[in-house]
Image: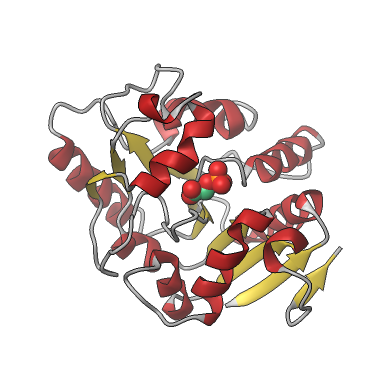
């Protein structure tokens, strides 16, 4: 794993945008997973600013949704697709028909997950996946414990994830308990992975997944064995130990 520690969240977003821009310059039609959550929002704002300034060309990108709450359609304000659309697709003028969705409202979620995996295969796998880190070490909604070959599927959220997502719903009672998630199999096979980690509340899990054993109990620890993984953490998440490459 290549680790970059930035002074703050702005530095994290700029360093992340530099990496995404490099991948997209080399592979303009990159198949790219775009996580929602708080952490990548600065990255998406930075990419949108570069796009407006003519410095970033997303016109051929092939975005993939990372996860979705079961039961919520794409037009529902609370759906992760809607979040992705508002935060990154609309600002980059990426039309809906270019996005591989995980449809939380599919009548047959298992068939929808198989269709998603088929789309990943047809795209030749992910060129880049942009991920956040759950406080329980999850990637997408691959909750612990999970096997490295877990496929794209319907899952139940752990209490820790419900608690962590309650801030987006007002209270924990409103958080959906079931979701669809891109599988560990397709995420770990991505040609490049960018894991973004911000804030002191992620420090313990960050060091567990970077320095600890590879374990089903910490899904992101499998990234130790994945190709070309870059972790960008702010100083709050990493701590003061400077045993990593620092970026302003
Ligand atoms: P966050 O979520 O970026 O909102 O902290 C990360 C995650 O739970 O995967």
Rendered-image quadrant of the C terminus:
bottom right
Residue 10, image x and y in percent?
A: 80, 49
Quarter of the figure with residue 190: bottom left
Residue 136 vs 67, above or below: the answer is: below
Residue 168 vs 236, above or below: the answer is: above
Is 30 left, or right, of 11 in this rendering?
left
Of residue 172 and residue 105, the one placed in the foreground of this image is 172
Residue 33 shows up from this direction: no
Quarter of the figure with residue 144: bottom left
Rendered-image quadrant of the N terminus:
bottom right
Residue 228, image x and y in percent?
A: 54, 74
Q: Residue at x 40, y 17 (%)?
A: 76
Residue 110 shows up from this direction: yes
Q: Residue at x 74, y 68 (%)?
A: 5
Residue 124, image x and y in percent?
A: 35, 60
Is 106 left, or right, of 27 in this rendering?
left
Residue 50, image x and y in percent?
A: 77, 41
């Amino acid at each position: 794993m290549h680790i970059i520690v930035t002074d703050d969240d702005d530095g994290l977003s700029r360093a992340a945008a530099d990496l995404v821009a490099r991948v997209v310059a080399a592979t303009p039609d990159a198949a790219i997973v775009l996580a929602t959550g708080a952490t990548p929002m600065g990255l998406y704002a930075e990419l949108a600013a570069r796009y407006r300034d003519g410095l970033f060309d997303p016109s051929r990108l092939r975005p993939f949704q990372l996860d979705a709450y079961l039961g919520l359609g794409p037009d529902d304000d609370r759906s992760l697709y809607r979040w992705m659309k508002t935060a990154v697709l609309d600002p980059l003028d990426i039309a809906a028909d270019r996005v591989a969705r995980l449809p939380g409202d599919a009548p047959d979620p298992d068939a929808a997950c198989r269709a998603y995996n088929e789309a990943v295969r047809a795209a030749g796998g992910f060129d880049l996946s942009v991920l956040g880190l759950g406080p329980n070490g999850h990637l997408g909604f691959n909750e612990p414990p999970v096997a490295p070959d877990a496929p794209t599927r319907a899952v139940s959220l752990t209490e820790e994830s419900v608690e962590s997502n309650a801030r987006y719903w007002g209270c924990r009672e409103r958080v959906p308990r079931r979701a669809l998630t891109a599988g560990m199999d397709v995420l770990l096979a991505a040609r490049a992975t960018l894991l973004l980690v911000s804030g002191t509340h992620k420090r313990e899990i960050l060091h567990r997944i970077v320095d600890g054993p590879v374990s089903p109990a910490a899904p992101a620890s499998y990234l130790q064995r994945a190709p070309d993984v870059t972790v960008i953490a702010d100083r709050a998440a990493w701590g003061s130990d400077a045993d990593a490459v620092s970026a302003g």
